[in-house]
Image (cartoon, rainbow, N blue to C red):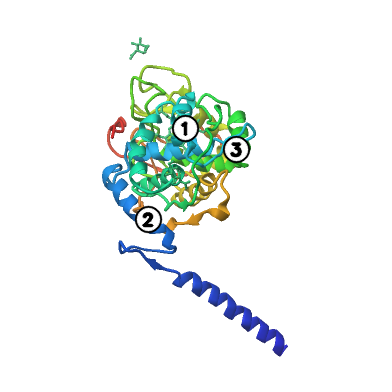
């Protein structure tokens, strides 16, 4: 009995020492910032540079493109080869940004390249640092993880690893499973990214057309608005991968529309509506899995504490003015759609995201 108590006490003390070691592990960098690992100190000057000279401290187009770039790089892995989250989309820009699904990403790659050349960092580490720092400018976003230590990419990803908006739900879920054993719930969580997003090329006559009414806020409006009945095309009419949206100035991808309505994903999709905690934790967890695809995580250093804590969002989700529960195409058969207020005032149209 006494022995048991003693050994219990020893394990409590041991646990406390471990916790304490974790707490006191702090390095003050020569630039003054504090981080958990001296190897992360090199990131602070890069962060200052990109915040000032690339993102302008905003959640604008370059942030959206930088986030999209993390996905198109990381998903380049699977049964047909590819190195995953290795920065190959930058190193082999001429090959990978000419794949149909990644057309247009040459712009952000060309924006990022001079910053990589100026700082001592591999393209892979830079690309995921830029994604996390950029997203930290979006109100309501989670503080995304950052890992460094990726070697230079040595080969391009093969074509057809990036899902297209005209792909079926079957093929999208199969691709994510093949790339990294992502579950359907994780696929839905990753699509939270479309809350800070717009399309330039789906309808090229209306570049910068957002997927929700608040493209600079990491809120759950994307999950609300994709569940509303589509009534109009914001531009030229039906394009490949586009279906009708509920709002002037807003574009809806066929893939988002179908994932919101498929029996495998609809309840998960709806569960994000007005659930700010969930959009943060679920996106962060799935994103953490995505950014190390193909990497040996034993060789990576966790520098997540260099990422600024994003501004919190204290606003409930709403139906856009003029719309309400009667416009919801209920797809989850087990849980009713959450009760939301409707924005006051006249029906409005969503403004495009200005080019950076
Ligand atoms: C089923 C999977 C997905 C499909 C079919 C898809 C498709 C698309 C398409 C067609 C665009 C518009 C591109 C343009 O015309 O400029 C877009 C934009 C975007 N996507 Fe996705 N996407 C998917 C998943 C993801 C994931 C997992 C992420 C990130 C984790 C992501 C992040 C973004 C962002 C941030 C944008 C906005 C880019 C900007 O505003 O410039 N997407 N996506
Ligand atoms: C990556 O390649 C660049 C340019 O060739 C080189 O300067 C750098 O040292 C390489 N980094 C690593 C980690 O191999
Ligand atoms: C739609 O696109 C087609 C083909 O590019 C073009 O001929 C037509 O003028 C466009 N219509 C509108 C309304 O922009």
Which numbered disc, 3 or 1, marks the residue closer to the eye? Answer: 1
Given contact means CB atoms under 8 Å apart, are the residues at marks 3 and 1 in contact?
no
Q: Are marks 2 and 1 in contact (CB under 8 Å)?
A: no
The earlier-in-sequence mark between 3 and 2 is: 2
Q: Quadrant of residue 116?
A: top left
Q: Which residue is mark 3?
A: 179
Q: Quadrant of residue 249?
A: top left
Q: Residue at position x 49%, y 42% from top?
A: 152
Would residue 48 be found to the left or right of residue 13 on screen?
left
Identify the residue at the far bottom of this view.
2
Separation of disc 2 and disc 1 at Cα?
A: 25 Å
Q: Is residue 78 left or right of residue 242?
A: right
Element at label 3 = helix
Could you tell me which residue is drawn at 41 percent across and 45 percent down? Answer: 126
Give the position of the C terminus as an image quadrant. top left
Q: Specify whether 59 is left or right of 256.
A: left
Residue 233 shows in this picture: yes
Q: Residues within 10 Å of mark 1 (few under 14, many from 20)?
A: some
Quadrant field for ligand 2: top left
Farthest residue in the right direction?
A: 1
Pointer 2 or 1: first along the chain: 2
State the mark number for residue 42. 2
Q: Residue visible at 60% across and 38% down?
A: 179
Q: Is mark 2 within 8 Å of ligand 2?
A: no
Label 3 with label 2: CB-CB less than 8 Å: no
Q: Nearer the viewer, residue 95 or 128?
A: 95
N-term-proximal mark, 3 vs 1: 1
Q: Position of residue 41 (x, y in %)?
A: 38, 59
Give the residue pinned by disc 1.
92
């Amino acid at each position: 009995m006494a022995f048991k108590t003693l050994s219990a006490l020893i394990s409590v003390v041991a646990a406390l020492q471990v916790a304490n070691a974790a707490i006191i592990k702090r390095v003050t960098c020569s630039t003054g910032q504090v981080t958990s690992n001296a190897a992360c100190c090199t990131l602070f000057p890069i962060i200052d540079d990109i915040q000032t000279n690339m993102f302008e401290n905003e959640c604008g187009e370059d942030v959206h493109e930088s986030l999209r770039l993390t996905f198109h790089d990381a998903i380049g892995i699977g049964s047909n080869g590819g190195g995953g989250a290795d920065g190959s989309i930058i190193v082999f820009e001429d090959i990978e940004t000419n794949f149909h699904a990644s057309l247009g990403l040459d712009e952000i790659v060309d924006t990022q390249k001079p910053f990589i050349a100026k700082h001592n960092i591999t393209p892979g580490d830079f690309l995921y640092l830029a994604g996390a720092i950029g997203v930290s400018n979006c109100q309501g976003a989670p503080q995304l993880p950052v890992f460094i230590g990726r070697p230079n990419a040595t080969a391009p990803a093969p074509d057809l690893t990036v899902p297209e908006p005209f792909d079926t739900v079957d093929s999208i879920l199969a691709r994510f499973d093949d790339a990294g054993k992502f579950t359907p719930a994780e696929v839905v969580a990753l699509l939270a990214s479309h809350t800070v997003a717009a399309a330039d090329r789906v309808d090229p006559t209306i570049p910068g057309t957002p997927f929700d009414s608040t493209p600079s806020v990491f809120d759950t409006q994307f999950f609300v608005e994709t569940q509303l009945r589509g009534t109009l095309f914001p531009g030229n009419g039906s394009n490949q991968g586009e279906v009708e949206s509920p709002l002037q100035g807003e574009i809806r991808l066929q893939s988002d529309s179908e994932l919101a309505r498929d029996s495998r994903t609809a309840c998960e999709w709806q569960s994000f509506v007005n659930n700010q905690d969930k959009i943060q934790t679920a996106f962060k967890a799935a994103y953490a899995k995505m950014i190390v695809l193909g990497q040996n995580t034993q060789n990576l250093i966790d520098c997540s504490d260099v990422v600024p804590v994003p501004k919190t969002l204290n606003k409930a989700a709403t139906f856009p003015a003029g719309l309400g529960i009667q416009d919801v195409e209920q797809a989850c058969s087990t849980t009713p759609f959450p009760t939301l207020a409707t924005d006051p005032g006249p029906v409005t149209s969503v403004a495009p995201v200005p080019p950076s």
